[in-house]
Amino acid sequence: MQIHIRYMAALRDRLGDGETAHDLPADITDSEALIAHLTRSDAEAAALAAPEIRLIRNDRIVTRPSALADGDRLAFCPPFTGG
Amino acid sequence: MPLAIQVSAEPIAAAERLSALTGQSPHDGAVASFVGQVRADGDLVALELEHYPGVTEAALGALREQAIARWSLSQAIIHHRVGRMEIGETIVLVAASAPHRRAALEAVSFLIDRLKTEAPFWKCVHTASGRHWVEARDSDTAASQYWRDQIAQEDA
């Protein structure tokens, strides 16, 4: 399964800009397994495990855990701070 | 009538937009509004707002629909600026028009409290020496949760 990942705001500063395609092992089928996978491969990614991190999947805000499907575009978001 | 939802890097002319909302409906006795502006805070020289285009407008639109339904508003607008802004500039304008004041005031309170935690905006503070991202405040989370609980109680 391939997922396109991007990081927003403070997470982008820590984890990189732009959208990156990730080829994932078959046993990763939801957001929490993906986070565990990313955390294993990059110590900086530990921030993604925080429960307050929000997800936008294919341009929709989703709750965690969220199912993932091949070709998904996933944005990891720090807590929102508008207004 | 002004656009209901607007997210733009252009300055918000809050007074003009409010005046476009007033006197529109003969059945409305109240127009309430909130204007959020950049505060001189510590060594802040400018504020920068990032957002997620498309998702932001959808989130604001959903909150607006909830407010209209719950408080029977005749009009509601949410205008939010993005990009870089200076001290004193308007960040956000929320306004609601209704037959009575309580509905208009509560709806505005709901909209600003909820949009802070439910629409994908992020604030970055620029100072003379660099920049840093604003952390979410527990008080904002609590204010948003208050309305969530209110609506859950009503729907139960």
Image (cartoon, rainbow, N blue to C red):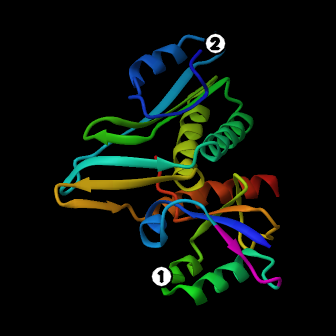
Decide whether residue A24 is among the magenta residues. yes
Q: Quadrant of the N terminus of chain B?
A: top right
Q: Within 10 Å of the Cα at label 1, are there few (<14), some (14-19), or many (20+) other Cα atoms?
A: few
Does residue B151 lie above or below B95 as drawn? below
Element under label 1? helix
Q: Which mark is residue B1?
A: none
User: Is B130 displayed left or right of A60 in the figure?
Assistant: left
Q: Quadrant of residue A13?
A: bottom left
Amino acid beneath label 2: Ser
- Closer mark to the observer between disc 2 and disc 1: 1
**To which residue does mark 1 refer?**
A44
- Which of these two is toward me, A54 or A14? A14
The magenta region covers A21-26
Does residue B98 lie above or below B123 as drawn? above
**To which residue does mark 2 refer?**
B25
* Identity of the residue drawn at 56% across and 48% down: B115
Subunit that carries the residue with mark 1 = A
Q: CA distance from mark 2 to mark 1?
A: 55 Å
Q: Position of residue A40 (x, y in %)?
A: 60, 90
Answer yes or no: are tags 2 and 1 on the same subunit: no
* Identity of the residue drawn at 64% across and 9% down: B26
